[in-house]
Amino acid sequence: MVKDMKRKLSRIARLEGARLFGVAGVERFAGAPRGHHPLDFLPRARSVVVVGLPVLKSIADYQTLLKNSEMITGKLRQEYLQQYFYQITGYDILNQRLEQIVLSLSLYLDDRGFDSIYFPATYSGQYKAFQNKVPGNAGIFSMRHAAVRAGLGEFGLNNVVVTPSYGPRVRFNALVTEAELEPTPLPAEQICLGLKCGACLKQCGGAALSLLDGAGESNNHHAGSEAVRLDPVSRTNIPACSSKRIQAFCYGRCIQVCPVGN
Ligand code: SF4
Ligand code: SF4
């Protein structure tokens, strides 16, 4: 274990704007599909470091913006809210910052002799250029799986990571490193409220979210970290979401309506 390194990395991340920081040992990725495991990127990887930035409340609740504008109304207002505010200020700009944070952390580790690799943030411009090349149209490294394994939250029924402080309104990025860092404990109890809430499923405007088989109440609310959902319990129909969310005026509603962290 590299002494004190985790505290220093956390400090750098926070100085650069991260609000969430966690570490997972590579053993928490046991069972990851071939090509997606940290060891597939660095054969001597020991840890995965994950950072998170929350989406501002005003952006998550973008329907409240521009209400009194005389210039931007009707369809144009919807376009501004979803594609200008939610997509650019709530997604692209956070992604750029996240990429800079994992770059800084990787350089810090590299300077101290630990090979490390970081990734383009999910759905950043660079990421999208490669997305279609991966079987299953998935990223080569899952930030959601990494964030959960780094103790920052758990998979919610909305198929994204739900965190105690910000609910699912957080973007993540990660790096893989040869440094053996002290892992962050997994959450002791479930964070997503499960089917007794179900707001994300009920209010999805594109009918794009569905539960996986066996993902009902049965796996809710056991005591202990083993009850926390480390893997998805639902599926997002990406083509349905992508084609309907603008038209249905529901881009991001699946994270907006979540009561956790609000
Ligand atoms: S963005 Fe809209 S369509 Fe897509 S999953 Fe969220 S609520 Fe459903
Ligand atoms: S809206 Fe409810 S069911 Fe969906 S992720 Fe949040 S707490 Fe879980």
Image (cartoon, grey):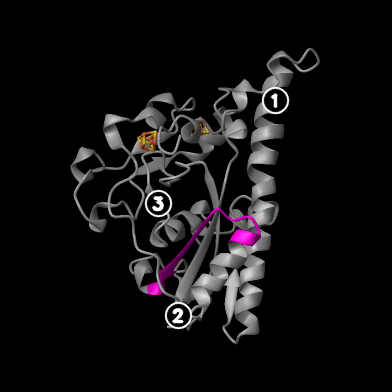
Q: Residue furthest right?
A: 71
Q: Which of 90 and 13 lies nearest the eye of the viewer?
A: 13
- The numbered mark at residue 232 is none
Coordinates of residue 67 in the picture (x, y in percent): 68, 16
Circles 1, 2 touching at the beta carbon (< 8 Å): no
Instruction: Residue 23: give x, y in percent of width and height.
Output: 45, 67
Asked which quadrant contains residue 134, the reply is bottom right
Label located before the other in sequence (3 or 1):
1
Amino acid of disc 3: Gly
Q: Give the vertical position of 53 relative to 206 (above or below).
A: below
Judging by the rendered image, the residue that carries numbered circle 3 is 153
Farthest residue in the bottom direction? 113
Q: What residue sits 64% from the left and 40% below the top?
A: 90
Q: Residue beneath label 2, please?
A: 180
Q: Residue at x 46, y 38 (%)?
A: 237
Q: Earlier in the sequence, mark 1 or mark 2?
A: 1
Q: SS of the residue at dot 1?
A: helix
Q: Is residue 19 left or right of residue 220?
A: right
Relative side of 32 to 115, left or right: left
What residue is pinned by disc 1?
Answer: 79
Quote the CA–CA distance across marks 3 and 2.
Answer: 22 Å
